[in-house]
Image (spheres, rainbow, N blue to C red):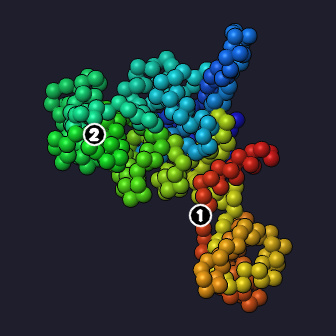
Amino acid sequence: MTATQAGGDVVTAASHASGVVVRCRGLTKRFPARRGLKEVVLHPFDGTTTTVVSDVSFEANAGEFLGLLGPNGAGKTTLLKMLSTLILPDEGTAEVDGLDVVRDAAAVRALVSPCLAMERSLYFRLTARQNLEVFADLQGLGGRERGARIEEVLAAVSLSDTGEKLVGQFSSGMLQRLLIARALLTRPRLLLLDEPTRSLDPISAREFRAFMREELARQRGCAVILATHNAEEAFELCDRVGVLDHGRLLASGVATRLSREFLGVRYRLATSHPDHPAFAQLQAQGVTVVSRTRRDEDGWHDVMLMMQVDHDPAGVLALLAAAGVPIAAFEPVRASLADLIEGVVKREVVT
């Protein structure tokens, strides 16, 4: 299927032909269905399969962050593994810089650096520099080039001053930065990240996102595809996002515009009279009162209003003020990532 395009945000090959790094067409992957022991014994040659990725098509450009959103089991990690040649697609094609991930797998591996979940391949009894030296040797990097690249990526992730500190003594944020340094060592055209900040505290995660935006996109110009459940990554880091469910790409575009298209616009209003009759007038005009919650001990409440994109927030506020509703605050609220995913999935079910 073709993903919904929001406001022309999907970048096509025609508009950025020279910048396309990844091109997928009809990508599909199936796995044998899980069966109990009894089923295996009674029907050992049953070929039942489960489709994990179904007819997915998209493109990603140099210097772009493309986020993959969706519930667990949506197919995000499987999609990343196909792009990194770790598993083969059953149907469709995927290309990295024009090279097919099946026919040109060895060449693709030289262009792609995956940094997937549950990474356990660092050597905890070695320093950061020694870990990178081992990886450089495995990649065939030797001599002065090896040393220069190691110093370059260590500086890029702010780990140059770790000295003789063993990796086993690193914090979660330092470990994540080292994994990124290792991924950058080969100067990839495509970087694949699976929930890159899930083990980081909020401050470290914010610093890490700032690093990724500055270092990966602006300075190195590689395409970055990341699977995430993090709202800040989806709304603030990613240039575009794609919403997957049961292996299908349901919608793609800028996260904020997808949110408006599928969920409308939400505003939080603080009032001491949350059950004022004026709210019923708003609902008659198509404005939905999502919730009413007590704000503090002074009697103020938060009333959440959900409007469609054609509603005028200033007009809504004027109506409430004219009706005598006491208002202490009126501000837009960004929908949660869960709300966005649920909204896209529900729209697909209805249609």
Q: Where does residue 100 sit, x and y in percent of width and height?
A: 50, 23
Work out whether residue 8 can be spotted. Answer: no
Secondary structure state at the residue bearing disc 1: loop
Residue name at image x 31 percent, y 48 percent = 171
Name the residue nearer the viewer: 22 or 123: 123
Does 41 sit left or right of 92 as displayed? right
Q: Where does residue 262 sit, x and y in percent of width and height?
A: 70, 55
Q: Where does residue 90 sit, x and y in percent of width and height?
A: 61, 20
- Find the residue positioned furthest to the right: 284
Residue 239 vertical placement versus 292 (above, below): above
Q: Where does residue 299 sit, x and y in percent of width and height?
A: 65, 84
Secondary structure state at the residue bearing disc 2: helix
> Looking at the image, is mark 1 or mark 2 earlier in the sequence?
2
The residue under label 2 is 168
Three-letter code for the amino acid on which mark 2 is drawn: Gly
Three-letter code for the amino acid on which mark 1 is drawn: Arg
Name the residue nearer the viewer: 165 or 207: 165
The residue under label 1 is 334
